[in-house]
Image: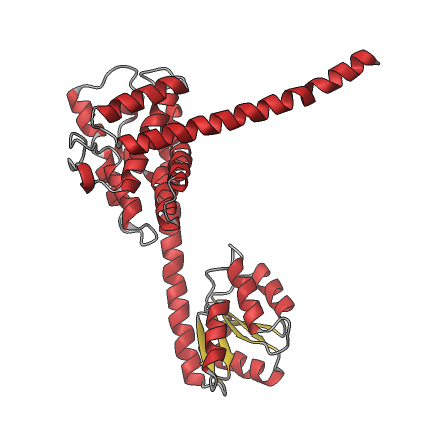
Amino acid sequence: MSDPARQGPRILVVDDDDEQRERLRALLAAQGYQVSLAHDADEAFERVEADPPECVLCDLSAPPSGSDEFCRRLKSAQATRLIPIVVFADLERLQRKIEALDAGADDVLGKPIDPREVAARVRSLVRMRGLTRELEDAQNVVFALATAIEQKDHYTEGHGERVAIYARSLAEHLGLGEDEVQAVHLGGILHDVGKIGCPDAILNKPGPLTPDEFQIIKRHPVHGWEICRHLQSLGSCTLGCIRNHHERLDGTGYPDGLSGDEIPITTRIMSIADVFDALATARAYKPAFPAPTCYRILTEEAERGWWDEELVRAFVDMMRSQELHRARNRARLRPLLARPAADEDAS
C-alpha cells in the first residue's frame, strides 16, 4: 500500500521549532500532502530549488533570516514569486500581521496554531496555485502560437518582438504608466497571433492580394482576440492592441471601424509600431525601406488621417534621437578600433 503523504501536492514547512514543525508535518500528511521540512531559511531554499512546493508554511523567529526576510527572498525571485506563503505570527499586534503581509506573505495565521484553520488555508492556496499554473500554461501556449506564426512566414520573423520594443519604447518616451507600457509590450508580441489561421499561400504571396484573400487576412485581429481574451493575465489594453491594431483614426480601418477617441492611446501606439516595422523590413511583396522613407510614409499617412499625428511625430523624434545616439557611439569607437593597427605600424 502506497504512502498517501507522497501522493498529494508538496508542502514545505519551514519552522525553527522542532515540536511545532513535527505537528504540522503530521497534520498535513494526514490530509494527503507530501511534506518537506526545513529548520531554517537556507535549508528551505535548498528544498525549494530541488523540488518547488505548491505552498510554504513558515514560522522563523531567529533574525536576520526570520519569516519576513524569507518571504522577501522567495517573492523577489522570478522562479518562486508565485509560490504562496503562509506565515504564523502572534496576532495580538496588528502591526505584526501588516509587516508579514508587506514582506510578501499571502496569509498570516495566528498562534497557537489551529489545525482546522491551517488545513483549510492550505487547501485554498493549493487550489489557487493550481489555477495559476493553468493560466501560465495557457499563456505559454499563446506565446508559442505567436512564435509559430513567424516561423510560417520568414519575412516576418522577429516582427512581434520588434513591434513590442518599438511600442514599449514609445510608451516610455511619452511617460505612460507601467501598466500601459507592459500592455503595449505584450500586445506587440501577440498582435498577429490570429494569423495562425491564415493559409501560408496568402501570408507568403509575393504579389497583391485578391479581395477574397484580403478579407481572410482582415479576420486575424478578431481571431487573435478570441484566442487571447480568456487569459486573465492580459488586460483590456493588451486585448485592445491585439484586436484593433489595424484601426485608423478616420474610421477606415478594421475590424470594428473605430475612429478618433474610440481608439485608446495604447492601440494607437501599437498601430504606429506595427506599420513602421512593416515598412522597415522586407516582405514577400516589397523590399525593406530605409528609415527616412519609413518616417516620410508614416507622416504622410498621419496627415491623411490614419494615424495620430502627435504620436507619429514623437515616434520619429524618438527614433532619430536613438539613431543619433548610435552614430555618436560609433564615432567614439572608431579611434579606439584604429589604434591597434596604428600601433602595429609604429612597431
The quadrant in which residue 210 appears is top left
**What x and y, as percent, mark residue 333?**
63, 24
Residue appearing at x 64%, y 71% in the figure: 64
In this rendering, would 339 be left or right of 130?
A: right
- Quick one: which residue is furthest to the top in this view? 345
Which residue is at the far right?
Answer: 347
Residue 198 picture quarter: top left
Please report the residue visible at 25 percent of the width from the left and 42 percent of the height from the top. Answer: 264
Where is residue 92? Give x, y as percent: 47, 87
Comparing 125 with 93, the one in front is: 93
On the picture, is 205 further left or further right than 98? left
Q: Quadrant of residue 141?
A: top left
Q: How far across and down, in percent of the image, does residue 127 sit?
A: 38, 67
Residue 307 at x, y percent in the picture: 25, 30
Q: Is residue 17 left or right of residue 125?
A: right
Q: Is residue 115 left or right of residue 345?
A: left
